[in-house]
Image (spheres, helix red, strand yellow):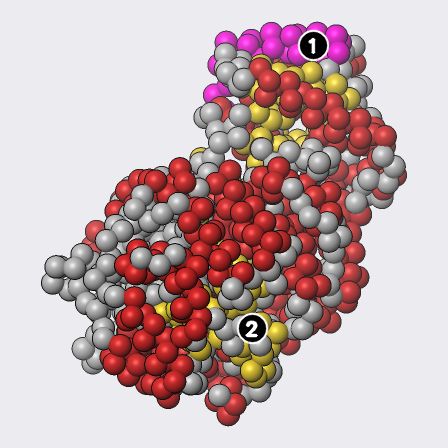
């Protein structure tokens, strides 16, 4: 519920809730609005829909190999010319010295050096990967990629492919500044414009690299230019889905002469820009509050205004520092954790691709991030717990590492932790069929022996169920390959079948994959075989939680389910747009799932446990991929 | 009661209870709190401006015998950097401040037992006479109690004499947390909560206007905070003498208290406190955002969470930070910060009368 002071925002809120895209005019109305709290509440709502209470950070290090730059951009007081006494150059050895094995990410950007050879850049990436295989390399903005292409007379594709081969994983989002020819001419006329920046990122995405995007705001740009910038990014994301996150960067005046030295952006402009970015970029998973530029305090507040990422421990943040950012050079990991916890969020240590490595919070409830858990959570209003959503397998890793106190987790992950956890009488149960655990195949199931099957990297239990069916019912020997499977991307043609689950499986309902003409609902196959429902997930709770806490949770879940199934029209259109299903189809889907565990379900759990331990004893657990 | 019902109740102008306040202190959705507080603020002060005062905050002495563990400012009398200014020196400072456009001097000291009562009377009298542009906003409750001890007069008589000399407002500092349990630990020589409240009550009854402050984020509990808020809300019901409430979070650097604190107040706690102050203190006209203690950015955000006043320009402090503000006077910067938060800026006097409104979008330099 939002009590809008600015009534112009009400139609925008309706669109946000329906999952519709905002228009240019909506963006302008948001930037012109003084109703900061309402904008924050909308953005926070969308943030929680996408990421629950998770706020990500990465243990990372920034490297700027040189400050010598052939360009002279007005807003930059980092770059110098070669003969300047402040000029510096780093060798690959000195870069390696700055890294350590604790890091998961290195962020490399620097000046456009007039003399360096191509081998130096490729060598830098290669050597980092050689010495620190755990560190993912995020390097070279589009500006640098363009420079390499021209200087070394290679196509953009060649540049990117050679770097990718050396070990590059993602491109940073810098160099976008603001997509406006007017501003470019005035402030950075030697630098590439919007068209080239977008072209380079598009090419990177097509070659399988991911990237970030930024907006530099708070200098001479207009709000129209800001909104236009966001819309261009949203369009490219629609096409490629290659952006990981968006980072609004507050302009730091420093000695640039564009604005008085200490005239920083207002806190309200910072929060509004973050919130409005969250709302407009509805196809971006993550919005970053870059604390080095915002101040720690404001970045903390931004975590309730749409931002779900704090960047990282950074280190060596020379560019922002030279222009007078007030944050210290290196914010220790513990500090980030404290800031995020103080903001009532879950600090999630991640890798470069937002894979969660560790949760640093108490009282975390895990949630499989699919529509089918909605009945548990829609009316679960308990502020004692923070909600961490993730696909089953990713949730399973964290669950097994002891990061979660309770939650709806995949059945086999629960089996693996049965010593420490028990379960409440709730789960996700396919009764005869489930509609969202589907094997698509080019051949009838009877002919799948010796075939190659792609398995979504999100599954824990469904994959084991598939193994049990194919290997124990049919006696097949099959090669499984973990793949990112998504309805929006083309399924690789060299597989004979693929397993999709959850919301992705729902998206395939109206968008049947070509060539894969056979489809099998795994719950149905299990039922046909055993005449039992199949339990995909259970509500696990830590055995050592105080009994009263367990009882409270039990009651909360009971109330949530009762309320959900007795309330009409409680499927927000948000989900219909997201899944390409109408309300009726979504209701039918949820009504078809059993959420309470009875005798049949327990029987099925026990039976499947036996099969699962047989898989284990046959050492089929060692995944052949 | 559900938290949202408490908020609805407050929005309808009903007073919330201490138990309900405790629930709000444990409620961490700051946007919900902020929304309600902002709505109440706009009902109470519907103009789209945020007030500020052009002031300076000097200290006539740093000699103090109270030894509060949260203070990094005081010195004992024989320490080498102890100082006490003469009345002449202070008057000269005020004249300089008046030339810079200062309208209010918030003057506090240590509590220096060697200064006679006449010193304080002379300060007030001569300020009124020789620097009439300046409104004296002098002396915390501890100093007034100190004057009572030095002079042998009752607190009431001290306040009467100061009033005759020309004083009619006093600052609300020294309240810290009105909890004797906490005060025994952090400022055991400073007097009890009742002392602070009594001085304020006497002052209000004599026609003084005062502010109230609260320092949180150290060793206090939620119950201590509620006791504090409850005490000042009751006194305000009785006297109506408070103009504004100013919560601020304890800043640990260089204080003996630092090592006893597990966790300092986050910006979340500060915004929560601003919002709750607005919601709970239904009889206070103004809630002040403390940009000086919380940082400028968080100060700006607080203006959307129930605060309607940005405090003072603190010319004196900014003299030291001058290097950072070479382009602007403090007044210009405060106006810019208020404009940046989306409000017009209204210069006020100590009694919250509006002197001049600086509209957004109008070049500040021309108007200051």
Q: Which residue is mark 2?
A: B352
Hey, which residue is sitting farthest bottom in the picture? B366
List the residue tagged with mark 1. Answer: A602
**Residue range highlighted in magenta:** A598-625
Q: Are marks 2 and 1 on the same chain?
A: no
Q: Nearer the viewer, mark 2 or mark 1?
A: 2
| Front residue of A504 and A322 | A322
Q: Which quadrant would residue A54 be assigned to in this image?
A: top right
Q: B31 above or below A23?
A: above
Residue B312 in view: yes
Q: How many numbered discs, if any?
A: 2
Q: Is residue B330 left or right of residue A586?
A: left
Give above or below for A334 relative to A220.
above
Using the image, determine if residue A409 lies above or below residue A304.
above
Is most of the magenta stretch helix, strand or loop? Answer: helix
Q: Residue at x 71, y 36 (%)?
A: B1
At 33% from the left and 40% from the top, the residue drawn is B185
State the image coordinates of residue A229 (x, y, percent, origin top left): 60, 70
On what subunit does the disc labeled 1 rest?
A
**What is the distance, in whole Å, between disc 2 and disc 1 at their CAs?**
70 Å
Q: Residue B147, position in %: x, y? A: 32, 60
Residue B27 located left or right of residue B178: right
Along the line of sight, which residue is nearer the eye, B27 or A401? B27
Q: Secondary structure at mark 1?
A: helix
Relative side of A519 to B365, left or right = right
């Amino acid at each position: 519920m939002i009590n809008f002071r600015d009534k112009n925002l009400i139609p925008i809120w309706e669109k946000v809730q329906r999952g519709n895209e905002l228009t240019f005019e909506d963006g302008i109305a948001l930037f012109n609005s003084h109703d900061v709290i309402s904008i924050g509440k909308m953005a926070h709502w969308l943030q929680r829909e996408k990421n629950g209470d998770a706020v990500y950070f990465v243990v990372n290090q920034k490297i700027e190999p040189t400050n010598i730059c052939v360009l002279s951009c007005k807003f930059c007081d980092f770059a110098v010319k070669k003969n300047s006494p402040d000029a510096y150059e780093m060798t690959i050895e000195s870069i390696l010295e700055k890294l350590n094995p604790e890091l998961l990410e290195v962020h490399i950007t620097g000046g456009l050096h007039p003399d360096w050879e191509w081998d130096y850049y490729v060598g830098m990436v290669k050597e980092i990967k050689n010495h620190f295989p755990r560190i993912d390399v995020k390097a070279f903005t589009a500006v640098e990629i363009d420079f390499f292409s021209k200087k070394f007379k290679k196509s953009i594709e060649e540049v990117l492919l050679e770097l990718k081969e050396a070990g590059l994983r993602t491109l940073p989002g810098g160099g976008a500044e603001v997509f406006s020819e007017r501003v470019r001419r005035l402030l950075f006329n030697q630098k590439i414009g919007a068209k080239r920046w977008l072209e380079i990122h598009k090419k990177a995405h097509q070659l399988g690299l991911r990237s970030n995007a930024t907006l530099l705001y708070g200098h001479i740009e207009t709000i129209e230019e800001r909104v236009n910038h966001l819309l261009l990014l949203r369009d490219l994301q629609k096409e490629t889905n290659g952006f990981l996150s968006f980072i609004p960067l507050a302009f730091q005046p420093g000695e640039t002469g564009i604005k008085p030295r200490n005239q920083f952006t207002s806190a309200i402009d910072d929060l509004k820009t973050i919130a409005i970015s969250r709302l407009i970029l509805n196809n971006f998973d993550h919005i970053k509050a870059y604390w080095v530029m915002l101040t720690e305090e404001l970045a903390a507040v931004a975590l309730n205004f749409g931002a779900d990422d704090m960047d990282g421990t950074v280190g060596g943040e020379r560019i922002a520092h030279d222009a007078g950012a007030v944050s210290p050079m290196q914010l220790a990991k513990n500090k980030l954790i404290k800031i995020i916890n103080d903001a009532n969020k879950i600090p999630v240590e991640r890798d470069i691709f937002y894979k969660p490595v560790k949760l640093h919070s108490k009282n975390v409830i895990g949630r499989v991030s699919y529509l089918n858990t909605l009945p548990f959570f829609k009316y679960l209003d308990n502020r004692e717990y923070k909600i961490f959503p993730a696909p089953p397998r990713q949730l399973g890793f964290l669950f097994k590492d002891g990061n979660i106190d309770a939650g709806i987790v995949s059945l086999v992950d629960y089996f693996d932790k049965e010593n420490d956890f028990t379960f409440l009488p709730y789960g996700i149960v396919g009764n005869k069929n489930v509609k969202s655990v589907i094997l698509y195949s080019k051949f009838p199931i009877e002919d799948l022996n010796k075939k190659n099957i792609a398995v979504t990297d999100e599954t824990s239990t469904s994959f084991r169920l598939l193994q049990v069916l194919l290997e124990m019912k049919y006696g097949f020997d099959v090669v499984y390959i973990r793949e990112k499977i998504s309805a929006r991307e083309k399924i690789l043609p060299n597989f004979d079948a693929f397993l999709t689950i959850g919301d992705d499986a729902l998206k395939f309902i109206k968008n049947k994959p070509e060539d894969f003409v056979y489809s099998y609902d795994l719950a149905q196959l299990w039922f046909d075989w055993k005449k039992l429902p199949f339990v995909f997930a259970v509500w696990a709770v830590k055995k050592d939680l105080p009994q009263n806490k367990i009882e409270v949770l039990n009651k909360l879940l009971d109330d949530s389910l009762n309320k959900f199934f007795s309330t009409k029209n409680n499927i927000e259109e948000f989900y219909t747009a997201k899944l390409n299903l109408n309300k009726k189809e979504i209701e039918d889907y949820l009504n078809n799932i059993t959420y309470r565990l009875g005798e049949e379900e327990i029987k099925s759990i026990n039976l499947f446990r036996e099969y699962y331990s047989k898989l284990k004893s046959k050492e089929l657990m060692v995944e052949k991929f | 009661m559900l938290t949202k019902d408490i908020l609805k109740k407050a929005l309808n102008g009903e007073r919330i209870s201490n138990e309900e306040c405790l629930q709000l202190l444990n409620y961490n959705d700051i946007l919900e709190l902020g929304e309600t507080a902002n709505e109440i603020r706009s009902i109470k002060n519907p103009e789209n401006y945020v007030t500020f005062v052009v002031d300076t905050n000097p200290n006539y002495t740093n000699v103090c015998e109270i030894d509060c563990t949260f203070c990094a400012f005081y010195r004992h009398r024989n320490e080498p950097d102890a100082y006490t200014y003469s009345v002449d020196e202070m008057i000269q400072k005020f004249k300089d401040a008046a030339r810079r456009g200062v309208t209010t001097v918030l003057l506090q000291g240590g509590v220096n037992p060697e200064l006679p009562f006449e010193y304080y009377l002379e300060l007030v009298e001569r300020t009124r006479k020789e620097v009439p542009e300046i409104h004296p906003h002098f002396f915390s409750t501890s100093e007034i109690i100190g004057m009572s001890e030095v002079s042998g007069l009752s607190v009431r008589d001290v306040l009467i004499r100061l009033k005759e000399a020309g004083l009619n407002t006093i600052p609300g500092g020294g309240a810290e947390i009105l909890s004797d349990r906490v005060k025994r630990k952090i400022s055991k020589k400073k007097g009890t909560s009742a002392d602070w409240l009594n001085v304020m009550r006497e002052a209000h009854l004599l026609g003084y206007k005062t502010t109230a402050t609260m320092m949180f984020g150290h060793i206090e509990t939620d119950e201590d905070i509620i006791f504090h808020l409850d005490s000042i809300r009751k006194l305000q019901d009785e006297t109506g003498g408070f103009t504004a409430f100013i919560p601020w979070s304890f800043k640990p650097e260089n204080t003996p208290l630092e090592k006893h604190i597990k966790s300092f107040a986050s910006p979340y706690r500060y915004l929560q406190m601003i919002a709750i102050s607005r919601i709970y203190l239904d009889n206070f006209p103004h809630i002040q955002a403390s940009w000086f203690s919380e940082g400028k950015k968080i100060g700006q955000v607080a203006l959307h969470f129930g605060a309607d006043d940005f405090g003072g320009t603190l010319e004196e402090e900014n003299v030291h930070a001058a290097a950072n503000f070479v382009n602007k006077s403090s007044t210009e910067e405060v106006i810019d910060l208020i404009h940046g938060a989306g409000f017009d800026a209204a210069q006020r006097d100590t009694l919250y009368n509006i002197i001049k409104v600086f509209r957004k979008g109008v070049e500040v330099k021309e108007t200051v």
